Image (tube, rainbow, N blue to C red):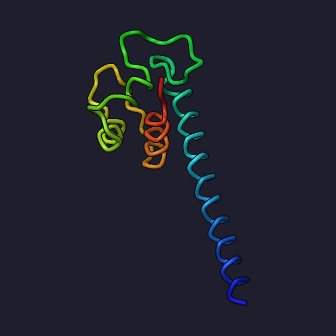
Amino acid sequence: MNKTRGLKGVVVASFVLALFDEGDAADLIHGRDIALRWCSQCHVVTSSQIIGSDSVPTFAQISESKRVDETQLSNFLADPQHSRMPNLALTRAEIADLTAYIKAQHR
């Protein structure tokens, strides 16, 4: 009886963890969608993108930067002080999704 109860607990815990993993993936997908819609005119936001400005960093470069962590990136996106950067007026959830997507990019 205890083995069955333990097995059921493991199955339930695995299912719950799988749901959280799917939620993380959904956030990255939403972040990618935001990046493609708002950022891809200037930044290279995907590894397959071939057009972008050479005067702004790619998302891969931002992701790999040792000077920019997730908190700094989130704060910047909430209130961009850069004169060429538009005020995107993103929600906190959108900023979190976009930040997660940017930080997941690598060369």
Question: Where 104 falls versus 52 (above or below)?
Answer: below
Q: Position of residue 99 (x, y in %)?
A: 43, 39
Describe residue 22's horizontal placement relative to residue 61 as left or right. right
Q: Which quadrant of the figure has residue 42?
A: top left
Question: Where 24 falls versus 89 (above or below)?
Answer: below
Describe residue 96's horizontal placement relative to residue 74 as left or right. right
Judging depth in this view, the residue of 83 and 24 nearest the camera is 24
The residue positioned farthest toward the front in the image shown: 3
Quarter of the image with the N terminus is: bottom right
- Residue placed at 49% from the left, 43% from the top? 97
Q: Position of residue 84 (x, y in %)?
A: 33, 19
Q: Position of residue 70 (x, y in %)?
A: 35, 42
- Residue placed at 32% from the left, 39% from the top? 69
Describe residue 75's horizontal placement relative to residue 35 as left or right. left
Judging depth in this view, the residue of 23 and 15 nearest the camera is 15
Judging depth in this view, the residue of 102 and 81 nearest the camera is 102
Q: Position of residue 18 (x, y in %)?
A: 64, 58
- Residue placed at 55% from the left, 28% from the top? 37
